[in-house]
Image (cartoon, rainbow, N blue to C red):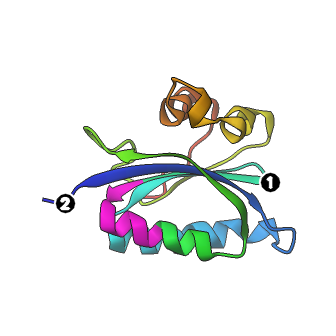
Amino acid sequence: MNNHNQVLYTSFISPDFNDVEVPDIVRRAREKNRLADVTGLLIFDGLCFCQYLEGPDHALERVFASIKADSRHLEITVKEHTSLIGHRMFASSPLAFAACDDPDRLDALRKFDPKKSERSAIAMLEQLLPMFSIEPGN
């Protein structure tokens, strides 16, 4: 049996990148995640990405290594990387997507410092989810 993990990170979009390409990135990521048995959510506010991923640890490591090597991401900051206990949050979606028109909504996650909080970044994300219109992307 594979161990499953979850990771939550934030990053800034490179100024060289055109944000109108985000739907194409989401489509390609969904294809790759589906093949890797990785599921999750990407939130984009025009400046910052917030992505939550879950899946088998080896597959998740490969997907995240690809993200870290992607020049469209600047200042990737892992907010939480832990074992997944229980069910996946996005089990039916290789990559759900939410566009966020209010950068302040992600501000708390961007500024979250796991060393200075007893709270989980993933719990914080779960509290924010009702504020977003999430496209499931099955």
What stretch of residues is rendered in magenta? 54-63
Tell us which disc is closer to us: 2 or 1: 2
In the picture as drawn, the residue positioned furthest to the right comes out as 15
Q: Which residue is mark 2?
A: 2
In the picture, which quadrant includes the N terminus? bottom left
Up-down relation of residue 130 to residue 51 (above or below)? above
Specify whether residue 57 is painted magenta: yes
Residue 58 image offset from top left, x and y in percent: 32, 68
Q: Is residue 95 visible?
A: yes
Judged from the image, the secondary structure of the residue bearing numbered disc 1 is: loop
Q: Secondary structure at mark 2?
A: loop
| Residue type at tag 2 | Asn
Q: Earlier in the sequence, mark 2 or mark 1?
A: 2
When the figure is inspected, residue 81 is found, relative to residue 102, above or below; the finding is below
Percent position of residue 77, x then y: 64, 52
User: Residue farthest to the front?
Assistant: 115
Which of the numbered marks, if any, corresponds to residue 46? 1
**C-beta proximity under 8 Å, tags 2 and 1:** no
Residue at image coords 50%, 72%: 65
Quadrant housing residue 71: bottom right
Residue located 27% across and 39% down the image: 85
- The three-letter code of the residue at mark 1 reads Gly
User: From where the camera sits, is residue 102 visible?
Assistant: no
Q: Is residue 70 left or right of residue 89?
A: right
Q: Position of residue 125 (x, y in %)?
A: 55, 35
Where is the C terminus found, in terms of image quarters?
Answer: bottom left
